[in-house]
Amino acid sequence: MKTTPKFLIAGLPEKTRNYEEALKGAGVDIAIGFMAENASEGNIPTSSIRQFNALLLPGGADIDPALFHQPPKGAKNIDRTVDLRQLQTLDAFVKAGKPVLGICKGMQIINIYFGGTLIQHIRTAAIHQSDQGDLIHQTWTAKNSFLHEVYGSRFITNSAHHQAVGRLGRGLHIIQETTDHVPEALIHDSLPIIAVQWHPERMCMTHSRSDTVDGMKLFDAFIQKLS
């Protein structure tokens, strides 16, 4: 009998509702919190990582530039405590060899974890982020990549970020870019880690839209890789 996969969303409950909706729609059980040595409010003991099939690193505020050895150059709305808890949670899943899906900030956390950097404010931020809600843009994927298998070589996603991956972390490869060459997805060359800069949870279910691809296809394809 096939068991239902369980994901940990490494975030704060009041900020993860869209991710919860999408994963539940994909048939996944979820928990919300962070991995730590000892259980406490919002923390799950690292020793219980066996109960989870995968980690989802969600979007969020900008990451403290000190964590990638840079002075502030455009980062804003920083929550260093959350950054550190997400990095600690990612570390637990990497060491356990468990799959990880990063979304927006989650992709940036992954890059920093592996020693990469961020561009704190990209030159073309106006076509990636707006105060009026998500923008959309065309993207291209690497041939034979995970995303190419799901969506093909060229497709439209949403966009809501003013930062981007700078120097790539160890073992990471770009598999999707925009017309201005901003990285939109990464994979790791030996670990089960996939990350996108866009928001599939805001392109499916009650948030589905006609001007982008269906974000649920990404969640479904990632879940299929667990079996």
Image (tube, helix red, strand yellow):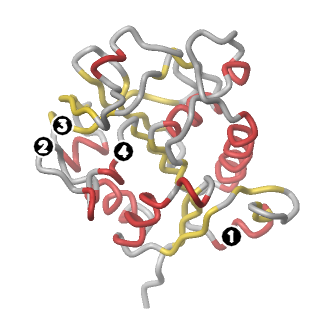
Q: Give the number of the disc on residue 211.
A: 2
Q: CA distance from mark 2 to mark 1?
A: 39 Å
Helix, strand or loop under label 4: loop
- The type of residue carrying mark 1 is Arg
Q: Would you name the residue on which mark 3 appears? A: 156
Q: CA distance from mark 3 to mark 4?
A: 12 Å
Mark toward the viewer: 2 or 1: 2
129 over 197 or under it: above or below: above
Residue ID for mark 4: 199
The residue wearing badge 1 is 50
Q: Please name whichever residue, 20 or 57, is drawn nearer the observer in this view of the structure.
A: 20
Q: Tell me which numbered mark, 1 or 4, is placed earlier along the sequence.
A: 1
Mark 3–mark 1 distance (CA, rounded to whole Å): 36 Å
Say which element carries label 2. Answer: loop
Amino acid type of disc 2? Asp
Above or below: residue 156 compared with residue 127: below
Disc 2 + disc 3, Cβ < 8 Å: yes
In percent of the image, x 84 and y 65: which residue is there? 39
